[in-house]
Image (cartoon, grey):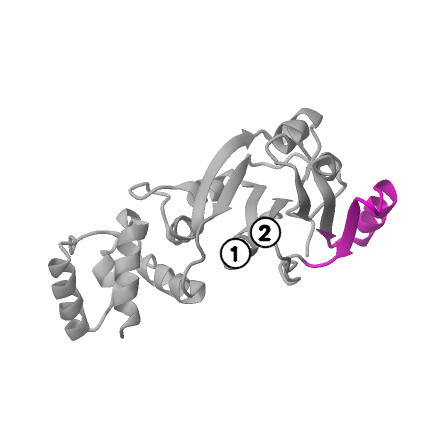
């Protein structure tokens, strides 16, 4: 994992402000601990905090810095290493590496049944896409998947000066709270990607290309009183579920 896209939260006021959003529980997980600025504050929230970090030197520093009775560190690629399986759900906190944000967000959604919540930092532009609502120009397949899996919101925009080294972009602290487990996340992801592949096209044109199948879908949309000219960015979670159920019948 390259560190070129990883910047470290270093402003003490922002560290305290963000950690104040975290509720005390028995167990918590932190991805990409880095130098441990946020880790130190999280240890006051959890009876035990498990950290995952790829850089060996940071792992060694963190193991020396914090009590092994309160903190454990695993050297791991967070994209590949599985989330812990526990009897109870738990919070995940992370300053996500920029170059891995997309795949990591999908991993969070894929494992949402294990999580009490996800709180973390990501690039502001990505956060806008995650937290967009139907009708917004930034609303896409990622925002829809988050809506299907729970509730997400952007809480704080952080200036570049809160990080070391200062990035050329702003970051946003988002909070995601999983809802009821979705039916077959992978199939839903396939369909959302298909429906949003050409954002300027209608939902119908993205859904099917075959003329005969398009006629059948058009007839179904009319029967359901759904505008056949609707575009992907106006697709609500409830409407998607209707389309998904029909699509699964193929």
Front residue of this view, candidates 125 and 216: 216
Q: Is residue 94 above or below residue 229?
A: above
Image point (73%, 34%), residue name: 44
How crowded pointer 2 is (Cα within 10 Å; few <14, some 14-19, many 20+) is rated as some
Q: Earlier in the sequence, mark 2 or mark 1?
A: 2
Quadrant into which the C terminus falls: bottom left
Residue 159 pos. (x, y %): 58, 29
Q: Is residue 13 above or below residue 110?
A: above
Q: Is residue 222 above or below residue 121?
A: below
> Cβ–Cβ below 8 Å for labels 2 and 1?
yes
State the extent of the magenta-drawn residues as a range. Answer: 52-77
- Image side of residue 148 versus residue 75, left or right: left
Front residue of this view, candidates 188 and 210: 188
Tally of numbered discs:
2
Front residue of this view, candidates 76 and 210: 76
- Image side of residue 64 versus residue 140, left or right: right
Give the labeled residue for mark 2: 89
Give the labeled residue for mark 1: 113
Let me know if residue 35 is in the magenta part: no
Quadrant into which the N terminus falls: bottom right
Image point (56%, 51%), residue name: 115
Residue farthest toward the top in the current orientation of the protein: 13
SS class, disc 1: helix
Residue 155 pos. (x, y %): 50, 32
Q: Quadrant of residue 197?
A: bottom left
Let me know if residue 57 is in the magenta part: yes
Is any atom of residue 222 visible in this view? Answer: yes
SS class, disc 2: loop
Residue 196 pos. (x, y %): 33, 56
Distance of mark 2 from mark 1, alpha carbons?
7 Å
């Amino acid at each position: 994992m390259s560190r070129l896209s990883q910047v470290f939260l270093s402003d003490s006021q922002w560290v305290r402000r963000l950690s104040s959003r975290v509720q005390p529980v028995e167990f918590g997980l932190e991805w990409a601990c880095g130098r441990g600025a946020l880790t130190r504050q999280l240890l006051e929230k959890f009876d035990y905090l498990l950290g995952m970090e790829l850089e060996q030197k940071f792992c060694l520093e963190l193991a020396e810095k914090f009590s092994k009775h309160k903190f454990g560190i695993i050297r791991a690629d967070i994209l590949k290493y599985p989330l812990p399986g526990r009897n109870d759900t738990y919070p995940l906190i992370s300053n996500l590496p920029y170059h891995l944000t997309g795949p990591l967000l999908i991993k969070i959604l894929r494992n949402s049944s294990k999580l009490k919540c996800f709180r973390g930092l990501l690039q502001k532009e990505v956060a806008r896409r995650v937290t967009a609502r139907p009708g917004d120009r930034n609303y896409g397949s990622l925002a829809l998947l988050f809506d299907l899996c729970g509730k997400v919101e952007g809480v704080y925009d952080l200036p570049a000066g809160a990080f070391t080294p200062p990035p050329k972009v702003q970051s946003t602290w988002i909070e995601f709270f999983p809802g009821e487990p979705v039916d077959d996340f992978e199939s839903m992801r396939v369909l959302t990607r298909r429906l949003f592949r050409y954002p300027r096209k209608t939902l119908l044109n993205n859904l099917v290309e075959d003329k005969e199948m398009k006629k059948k879908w058009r007839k179904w949309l009319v029967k359901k009183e759904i505008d056949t000219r609707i575009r992907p960015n106006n697709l609500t979670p409830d409407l998607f579920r209707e389309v998904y159920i029909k699509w699964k019948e193929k």
